[in-house]
Amino acid sequence: MADSTSISSSPSFGARIGAGAIAAALLALLGLGFGPAAAHADTTLDGPVDIGTAAPFGVLGASEVTNTGPTVVDGDVGVSPGSSITGFGGAPDGALTGTLHQTDAVAAQAQSDVTTAFNTAGGLTPTTSGIGELNGLSLTPGVYSGGALSLADNGALTLAGSATSVWVFQAASTLTIGSATHITMTGGATACNVFWRVGSSATLGTAAQFIGTVLADQSITATTGATIEGRLLASNAAVTLDTNTVTAPTGCPPPGTPVTTSSPSITSGTPTAPVAGTPYAFTVTASGAPSPTFTVTAGALPAGLTLNGTTGVISGTPTTPGWSAVTITASNGQGPDASATYTFVTAPAAVLAGAEGVLPTGPEGATASLADSGSDLVLPFAAALALVVLGFVARRFAVSRSVRGRL
């Protein structure tokens, strides 16, 4: 299309067409086209693993608890049936905000509850089996099982869900979290609902940033500078600390609270029309739990526009007039995914030169004055563009009839 187009009010356009009707026709032509609606699936899972009276503990050992350096435990520290707790005598040693339970009835009951929780977590049916290395994964709620689980040095693991989402990791043998690793949570997910059931021993590397409650059959070792948003609970061996920060989760939902996940469904409507050279934004929205992410799965956005995969915002400054169709898919790990196809018509910076002026364009839209049988007709941009399209079609139709008439 040229930068401007003359519109004639001559009879070749036929009878006048109302602006509202033209706009409606063009919106139908350029509107949002959805593919076949995907089935919507909800899944209800059991709530958090019940750790009973062990919930207030940041650290609980069986044989002993040993600390080196200024560790801080936001919660209780205990040991049972062993009796040795060292390194919590105040500065420069470790400190705790809760209570020290050294071979008392509280620690004994907590250990009993840890054993029950360990068995419960081990008895859950995996949603995903055979996992090992966790680096680079983004995991939706579920039960993940494997032999030896590990997160490589400098690795990253993302848990994507909501405030009620639950993750249970079943390591048949060891759990090894490397140095300088990061576990992050998105969508409002919390450390309350992350559990690591470890068949033997767990090791958290130097400066690791770890999330979740460790239920280890044997020992747990947190090396220098590791931070834990969760709990370290060892059933039959020691817990060893070294200049760590352990924060026991609080305000957690009651065990057994149902957790519902749902597949995504796209809820956004028809996008507005972009204009070359003018900043543009349109948000693709979708329901679902956990919150979906967005990707381009077919076609392409207009040149100059990009899609934010987390927020669903299409934004930028389009550079080239023309047509563009793109399919965007929303996914959250709960099948089926949802997809929608959007059609964009990027207009030139200034178009539609009429009998009484040129239609300007801008971020708020545009209008044009068109002389038609002596009266002014103010058209929205979409309607004016429709006149161009309809006029072209009408002329082609008239030429076709003329040729057939001559034959």
Image (spheres, grey):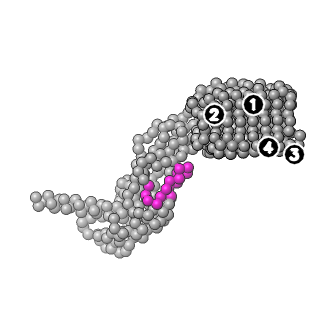
Question: In the image, what residue type sits under mark 4?
Answer: Thr
> Mark 3 or mark 4: which comes first in sequence?
3
Question: In which quadrant of the rendered image does the C terminus lie?
Answer: bottom left
Q: Which residue is mark 4?
A: 243
Q: Is residue 347 above or below residue 191?
A: below
Residue visible at 85% across and 38% down?
A: 87
Task: Calculate the distance from the C-alpha at mark 2 to the C-alpha at mark 3.
Answer: 34 Å
Task: Calculate the distance from the C-alpha at mark 4 to the C-alpha at mark 1.
Answer: 18 Å
Task: Calculate the distance from the C-alpha at mark 2 to the C-alpha at mark 4.
Answer: 24 Å
Left or right: 98 in relation to 407: right
**Magenta residues, dominant SS class:** loop
Left or right: 389 in relation to 131: left
Question: In the image, what residue type sits under mark 2?
Answer: Leu
Number of numbered discs overlaid on the protein picture: 4
Residue visible at 27% across and 64% down?
A: 13
Q: Which residue is mark 2?
A: 149
Task: Calculate the distance from the C-alpha at mark 1 to the C-alpha at mark 2.
Answer: 15 Å
> Mark 2 or mark 3: which comes first in sequence?
3
Is residue 402 or residue 104 the one in the foreground?
104
For the record, the magenta segment spans: 301-315
Question: In the image, what residue type sits under mark 3?
Answer: Pro
Left or right: 89 in relation to 306: right
Question: In which quadrant of the rendered image does the N terminus lie?
Answer: bottom left
Q: Which residue is mark 1?
A: 219
| Location of residue 47 (image quadrant) | top right
